[in-house]
Image (cartoon, rainbow, N blue to C red):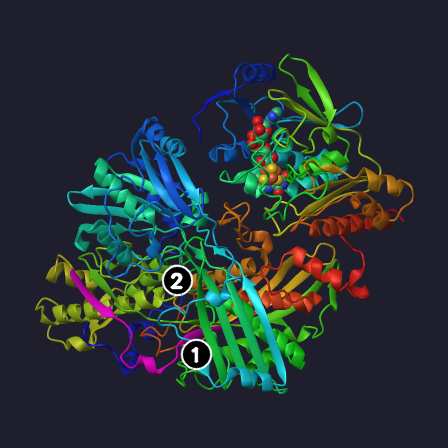
Amino acid sequence: MSDQRATLADWAKPNPVTDNRSGLIGKAVDRYDGPAKVTGTAAYAFEVETPSPALYGILVTSRIAKGRITAVDTASAEAAPGVRLVWTHLNIPETFADPEGKVGFAKTHFPLFRDDRVRFFAEPVGLVVADTFENAVAAAQLVGFTYEVEGPATSMDTALDQGEIPTGDPDLEMGDFEAAFAASPVRVDGIWRTPVINHCQMEPHATVAWWEGDVCVTHTSTQVLKRSQVYVSSTLGIPQDKVRVFARYIGGGFGGKVMNHWDLILAPLAARALSQPVKITFTRHQMFHATVHRPGVTQEVRLGANPDGRLTAISMMTWSHCDSAGVFTEPASRFARNLYAAPVRRMGLRRVRLDLPPPGPLRSPGEAPGMMSLECAMDELAEQLGMDPVELRIRNEPESDPETGKPFSTRQLVRCMREGAQRFGWDRRAPVPGQVRDGRWLVGMGMAAAVRGSAILPAKAGMGVDADGVVTLSQAMTDIGTGSYTILQQIAAETMGVPLEQVSVNIGLSDLPPAPGSGGQFGAVTAGSAALAAGMSLRKALAQLAAEDPDSPLHGGPAEAATFQDGMIAIGNRSERLSALVSRAAPDGVYREAASGPAADQGAWDRRSYGAQFAEVGVDTVTGEVRVRRMLGVYAAGRILNAKTARSQLTGGMIWGVGAALTEGNYPDPRYGSFVSQDLASYLAPTHADIGELEAIMLDEEDPKANPLGAKGVGELGIAGSPAAIVNAVHNACGLRVRDYPVTPDKVLAHWKSNPLPLAARGRGVR
Amino acid sequence: MKPFTYERAVDAAQAVRAVASTPGARFIAGGTNLLDLMKLYIEQPTHLVDVSRLPLAGIAATSEGGLRIGAMATNSQVAAHPQVRAHYPVLTGAIVAGGSGQLRNKATTGGNLLQRTRCAYFYDTTKPCNKRIPGSGCSALEGLNRNSAILGASPACIATHPSDMAVALVALDATVEVLLASGAQRSLPVADLHRLPGDTPHVETDIAPGELITAVVLPPPPKGAQAYRKARDRASFAGGLASVAVAGGQVALGAVAHKPWRASAAEAALRAGASPREAMDAELAAAEGHERNAFKIDLVGRMGVAILSQNAEDRA
Ligand SMILES: Cc1cc2nc3c(=O)[nH]c(=O)nc-3n(C[C@H](O)[C@H](O)[C@H](O)COP(=O)(O)OP(=O)(O)OC[C@H]3O[C@@H](n4cnc5c(N)ncnc54)[C@H](O)[C@@H]3O)c2cc1C
Ligand code: SF4
C-alpha cells in the first residue's frame, strides 16, 4: 500500500468515513483534549516535568539591527548568583548548518551564533543558563556586547526595483498585459500595502531538553515534529534516531511554529554541557523580533474590464521583505492566478532583502494579505461599473482553472456568494456610500470572495486495538489548538466501529508514524487520511484473525465481508465483541500501520476550498473609529469532519480578518530597524469588544478528488477575504477607500478633511 | 527583573517610614504598572513596600457633600460604587474605558494616578529616551510618534499620560491627599499633580519619592451633564488616541499631553458664550502636531465639539 499510490478511482469507492454509519463524522464532538486543557493538566512544553530538576536558559538578544560585535563581556554574568553557563559566538559548542536546507525558511538561524555579525534587531547572540528563571533573567542583563553599528535598510518601497524572483516561482505571463490593459474601457490601478503581522501565539516558543544516554529528549512548541527532529539531528550532528521530539499540547502556532528556533537547539546543547535538563522560553518581548512574522507586502493590482463587467486583463505583482539570507517570500499574488477568468494575465512575486527580522508563514500565507488588495480592487471595479460586487464576481467565474485549464474538483464560490447574500440581507445594501445612518454611526456593507488551496501530503499512521477493545491511533501529528486530537478520534471510532470513549489518540511524539504536522490547512485531511488507511489495514487484520480462529463465531467466514459497528466485528449475522476476539486470539493486541498521500492522478484537478465573506461596519462620524457590527462567512470546504472545531477555525479566521483590516500591524523604525510594538498592549490583536455578530455557515460538499475523506482545509479559509469585506464595508459606509492597512481613525479623519461628510451624515447624536 | 527585597506594610505611617529609610525603595499597590516596568529593567527598585493591604480602600461621603475615595480602592470598586455611578458618572465612564476587567480589579486609585507613559520608546530599553535616561535624547520626536502629545510638550519629551481615570478627576476638580514621611499630611489638586515635561521629563509629578497618596477627594458634583468619551484603535483594552471628560462646564482632555489636560481656555470661551467649535478651537490654538500624530488635534477637537453640543442640547 505504501509504495502503490492510490488513484482517484480508489478514493471514489465508499469507505467507513464516507459511509459514516455511526454518524460520528461531521458531528459537533467536544474536544478530546478539552478537559485536560481547562483543568490545567495538559502540560505545555515549558511545563513538562523533568526527570531531575531543570536549569533555566534565557536568550540574550542584540540591541542593534545590523553591525558587528566588537567586544563581549561575560564576566559579571558568569559571576552572578546561580549562573551555570554563558555562551556567545566566542564559546558556543560547534553546531552545523543543515546541508540540504531541509529545515525550511529560516536559514539565517544556522548554525547558531555563527559569527560576530548581527543581522537583525533582537537577534539572539547569547545564552545564559542558571538555576532559576529569575537568576537567568537577571544575569542575562549583565552580558555586555559592544557593537559597531551599521545603518539598517528597512524600507521596501524604496527598493522595489531590487526585488528578486523566488526560485521555483516564475512570473505568469498570459498575453500582452500592458496592451490589453491600455485597451480596456474600464480600469482599476492601485497600490495596496499590508503591514508586518505578528503571530502572537498564546504560548511562546519554548523547549525543555535532557539526555538519556546518547538520546536527546525534547519537549517543544512546534507544528512539525519530524522537521523538528531533522533540525535537531542535523544541527547537533547526531543521528535522527537519537532525537525524540515531543509536542503533546501546543498553545497556538499559526505558521510561526513550522520553523524551529534557537530554543530547540540551545536547550539540548546546554543540557548536554551541564548534564542536567534545561528549559528555554522566549519572552513575550522576544517573540516580536526573534521568531518570525508575516512580512509587509506592497501589492500592485491592475484590472481591465469591459463595460459588461467581464475582466479583460488582470495583473497582480507583490513584493514582500526578507532577511539577508532567508528564502521566504509571501506568495501574495499566487491565488490570483486561479480566482477570476480573464484572457490576459500577469502575476508575480518579488522578494526584497531588508535588515529586518526573518519573515515566515502566518495563517493563510498568500491569500490572507493578497486578497486584501485584489478583493478591494474588485469592489472598486464594481463601483466604477455601477454593478453589484456579487454580480461582478459571478460574471468572472471561470469554467476551469484560468492558468492551467484544469477542471475544478469542486468550486461552489458562486453558491457561497448567493447563499451569503441572501442570509446577510445583501439586498438592503445601499449602492451609494454614506447613505445609511444609525445614531452616530454611518453604516455600510461589504463582501469579498475567499479561496485557499487544499493539499494532501504523504503521511503514515498506526491503529491498534488491545484486549479491552480500546482503539489507539498513533501518529507524529500535532494539535496546535485546531482540533486534530478530536477529528482523529472521530475517524478512528467511525472506522473501527467503536464509540468515541473507546478511542485513545496518541499524537505529539516524533517516534510515531510520520505526518507532516499542522500547517497550510493540510493537517486534518493529511493526518485523517492516513488514520483511515491505518484503520482499514487493522480491520483487515482483525477480520483475518477472526476468520482463522476456530474459537471465533466468525470462524471460516469470508474475511473481506467483515463489518465493524457498536464495538463488534461481524460477518453476515455472526458477530463478536472486538475485545472478546482480541483478548482471546491476540492478547497483546493487534496493530497496523499504513500510509496515504496524494493520488497518482490527482494533479489533473484543481482543488481548493472556497467561501464568501460579508461584513457590516459602523464608522463613527465623530472619531472615525470603525467597528464591525456583523460578519457572515459561507464556506464550501468539502466534508466537514467536526462541525464545532471547523466552525471555530472559520470564525477564528474571520476574527483574524478583523485584526488585519482594522487594528493589527507592526512598523519598523527606519533609524533602528526594530518594530515599534513589542508587547500585547501595543500590538493590537482584536478583543471581544471588536467582534460583533459572527456566523460561519458550511455548505454541504464532498470532494472525493481532494482525499479519501472528501474533506478540505478549513483552518486558513476564514481569514482569506474577510479583511477585504470589512474594508469594502467601510467604503460603503462612508466613501473612503483605504489602501494602506489597517483602517485606523486617523485615515478616516484625513479622508473627511478633504471630503467633508455629507450634511445628512453630520448630525450630532453623539455618545 | 533585578533582585529586590519586599515587605508588606501594616499601617500608612510605617509604610512611609519604610520607604523613606531605605534608599531605592518604592511603594507597590496593584503592581500592574510597576511590575511590568521592573521586568523590563525600566524601574529597578531595590526594596518594595506593599501598600495594597493598608486599610485605605474605603469610599465614603464627605461632610462637604463630596466623596472621599481611599487610595487603595481598586478601579473596579470605584467604578461600580453606587455613589460614584449616581453622582460622578464621568468617573465611572473613564475608569471602565481603561485597561481590562482583570487590570481594573488589581489597579488602585493611587497607582492609577502614578502610572507611567506608554510611549513605545520608553518601553524599549535599547533606545534613547530622556524620561528613562535623562539626557539620552527623545526617540519619539523623529520617530513613530502617532500616540504622542499635541499640547504642552517639549523638545525633550512628547509623551502623554495614559490614565483615563485622572482625566475625569481633573474635570471634577478632585484633590489628592498625601502622607509625608514626617507624618505630616498635605493635599493638592489632581490638576497640579502631574507636570509638563520641560527639560526634566523624568520628573513626572509633584509627589516626592516616599510620599504616599492616601485618598482622592471629590467635591460635590458640579451642576450639569457628565460624560467621558475615548477614541481608540480597538474597541477595548487600548490606550486612548484622545479622550474628553465633561462635568458640567468643566472640561478635561486625555492622551493629548504629559498630564491630564484641563481645557481652561475652552471653559472660559464657553462661559463667554462661544459655541462648542469656537471653544475647542480656542483650546487647541496652541496645539502642535508631529509627523504622525497631528490628526489628534482634529480628533480631540471633533470629540470636544460633539460632546459639548450634546450637553448643550440636553440643557435646551
Ligand atoms: C496592558 C495595560 C493596559 C492599560 N490600559 C489602560 C488604559 O486604557 N487606561 C488607563 O487609565 N490605564 C491603563 N492601564 C494602566 C493601569 O490603569 C495602571 O497600571 C494601574 O492603574 C496602576 O495601578 P496599580 O495599583 O497597579 O499601580 P502599581 O503598579 O502598584 O504602582 C504604579 C506606581 O504608583 C506608585 N504607587 C502606587 N500606589 C501609590 C500610593 N498610594 N502612593 C504613592 N505611590 C503609589 C508605585 O510606586 C508605582 O510607581 C493599563 C495597564 C496595562 C498593563
Ligand atoms: S517622548 Fe518622552 S518617553 Fe517617549 S522617547 Fe521621548 S523622552 Fe522618552
- Give the residue drawn at x 18%, y 77%: A560
* Mark with earlier residue (1, 2): 1
Where does the magenta region start and end? Answer: A590-613
Residue A159: horizontal and vertical position, in percent? 50, 62
Q: CA distance from mark 1 to mark 2?
A: 19 Å
Local secondary structure at mark 1 = strand
Labelled disc at residue B144: none
Task: Report the disc number at residue A328.
Answer: 2
- Dot 1 crowding, Cα within 10 Å, few <14, some 14–19, many 20+: some
Residue A144 in picture, x, y percent from top left? 39, 34
Q: Amino acid at mark 1?
A: Leu
Residue at 67 percent across and 72 percent down: it is: A429
Where disc 2 sits, the SS reads loop
Marked residue chain, label 2: A
Q: Position of residue B303 (x, y in %)?
A: 75, 50
The kind of residue on which mark 2 rests is Phe
Res B150 seen here: yes
Residue highlighted by disc 1: A172
Q: Characterize the local packing of mark 2: few (<14), some (14-19) or many (20 or more) Cα atoms within 10 angstroms.
A: many
Residue B291 or A522: which is nearer the viewer? B291
Quarter of the displayed picture in which ligand 2 can be seen? top right
Question: In the depicted view, which residue is nearer to us: A269 or A190?
Answer: A190
**Was residue A120 drawn as part of the magenta stretch in this picture?**
no
Residue A138, image quadrant: top left
